[in-house]
Image (tube, rainbow, N blue to C red):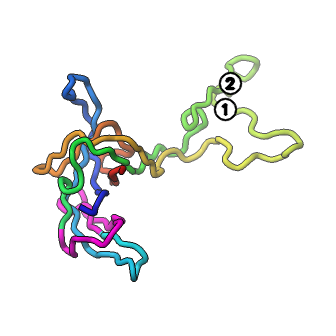
Amino acid sequence: MDVNSFFGYKIKQTQDFDQKGLKKTFTIIKAEPLVIKRIKVKDKDGYWAYLVEVGKGLKKRKKTLLREIKLDKEPSLKIKDQLQIADVFKVGDVLQVTGITKGKGFAGVVKRWGFKGGPKTHGQSDRERAPGSIGQGTSPGKVWKGKKMPGRMGGKTKTIKGLKVYKVESDKNELWITGLVPGGRGGLIKISKLS
């Protein structure tokens, strides 16, 4: 098949034993069939792609989303055709998984960046979670952009490479992936095959 990506929702993380009897961590993705709503054409749009409907058939999802799957060549499927998870992935495929990390709100430098903090002695018993000095002297006389400071933590797009397909359960529309993927339960996940 010409498709090497799929969309689904994170159900949960679990543990199981592999064929060698070793305990492994897995993420289960609910990957309902994707309905093709539009086909992007190279002559008109500049590239080939399917525009698919994600989330149809999930009870918790009130709205469906439209997402794009880019293609290397002219597509073989038509509008209203469905993409099944078993058509795209098989056991052992190496994956790249993209999701949005859990938002943790405003966080200080100790939680956000892992700063050690200052000592509780020498007259600063109330400053152990403070960042300390942030600037230099006369040269450059400013704080550089990108300085590690307190701020909003999480809620960013993150990609993890090198995960593998452990199990494809076509009857349940579930995909078992080795390792952990970003985001909380119910978060949208993009799964792509690494060539």
Quadrant of residue 76 within the rendered picture: bottom left
Q: Residue at x 19, y 28 (%)?
A: 19
First in sequence, mark 1 or 2: give its number.
Answer: 2
Whether residue 17 is in magenta: the answer is no
Residue 95 visible here: yes
Quick check: can you spot residue 68?
no
Residue 29 vertical position relative to residue 126 in the rendered view, above or below? below
User: Which amino acid type is shown beneath numbered disc 1?
Assistant: Ala
Secondary structure, mark 2, is: loop
In the foreground, 159 or 185: 159
Q: CA distance from mark 1 to mark 2?
A: 7 Å
Indicate the secondary structure of the residue bearing disc 1.
Answer: loop
What is the x, y in percent for residue 13?
28, 37
Toward the right, the furthest residue is 138
Circle 2 packing at 10 Å, graded few (<14), some (14-19), many (20+), is: some
Q: Is residue 116 left or right of residue 49?
A: right
- Marks 1 and 2 close (CB-CB < 8 Å): yes
Q: Is residue 54 magenta?
A: yes
Q: Is the N terminus in the top left, top right, bottom left or bottom right quadrant?
A: bottom left
Q: Which residue type does callout 2 highlight?
A: Gly
Tell me which segment is drawn in magenta: 52-81
* Residue indicated by mark 1: 130
In the rendered image, residue 169, in percent from the top left (x then y), is placed at 15, 46
Q: Quadrant of residue 119?
A: top right
Q: Residue at x 65, y 41 (%)?
A: 148
What is the number of the mark on residue 118?
A: 2
